[in-house]
Amino acid sequence: MTFANWVLVGVGLFAILGAVGAFTIAFRRARAERPDPTAGVSAETLRADRSMAGVKVDVSSALAEEGEAGGGAVAVATAPAEVEEEAAEAGAHEGLELVEAQRVVEVTPEESGVSRRQFFNRAIAGTFFAFLGMQGLYYLAFFWPKITGGFGSNVDAGLVDDLKAQTVTASGSVVPVFIPEARAYVVPAPTTLSSEFAGKGVEAGGLFALYQRCVHLGCRVPWCASSVGFECPCHGSKYNSVGEYYAGPAPRNLDRFQVEVNNANRLIIKTGTIIQTPRAPIPSVKYPQGPHCI
């Protein structure tokens, strides 16, 4: 065996002996920390205890007999460790009772404040009722009748003389006056009314009030200055300057409102009364007077 092998064997034995020594020291220190209950007891007492091994005495009976006798010492012939264990178990089960109690303390709302759940519940409820309130106001405003002013009522279009001056230029060409509140064009009426207009109250002070809506599908009909008439940009329906049908898919003349002149010589447009008239067999005015816009 070489020298190196002897060195390895020596190192291994040294490690084993060191491990055994460390284990022995740790074991002794552990036993030294645990107190010995028989320390200081004489050998005769120890022999007497060992001779009584296995003998048990009812501690409660002995104590009761002691109480009846009125005092005195009671000899207990049992192993001390076993008596202590039985007494501890009996006391743990007989004398100990756990009672769980819950204490409820009421606080005022000012002290407790608002919880997270209460905050979100109130926020959702407030949002919902605010939405219902706004919807109710909207429907109320929609269905509330307009007593005065606005479309559906009598609209004051202005002085008749002023309207006549505005609807006819210096060259004699017609230019309608649009009244936004009435949704109507005010145009000069022909000198002689055709049969479809007579007796329906659609002319007053030499003026007509034409509804801006096309009778085909309801598009707004703009004025075409070059042709001197109304031409619908949606489907090409055409009407002359007094709203009589000329061409296109429209089934009749432009609708018109009843009008009247009050004591102040002002034209009143009754937008609550719409008059429908059929196509005129003979137009009241010439149309077109120039190129079409549509």
Image: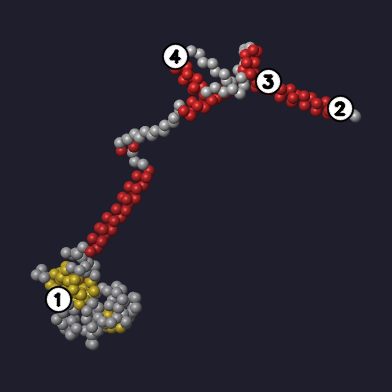
Foreground mark, 4 or 3? 4
Which residue is at the front of the view, 58 or 142? Answer: 58
- The CA span between labels 4 and 3 is 49 Å
| Element type where label 3 sits in the image | helix
Earlier-in-chain disc, 4 versus 2: 2
- The numbered mark at residue 6 is 2
Asked which quadrant contains residue 201, the reply is bottom left
| Crowd band around label 3 with a 10 angstrom C-alpha radius: few (<14), some (14–19), many (20+) | few
Earlier-in-chain disc, 1 versus 2: 2
Q: Is residue 293 above or below residue 157?
A: below
Amino acid type at image mark 1 = Ala
Foreground mark, 1 or 3? 3
Residue 145 visible in image: yes
Check disc 3 and report the residue beneath it: 28
The structure's colour scheme is: secondary structure
Is 217 placed left or right of 4 in the picture?
left
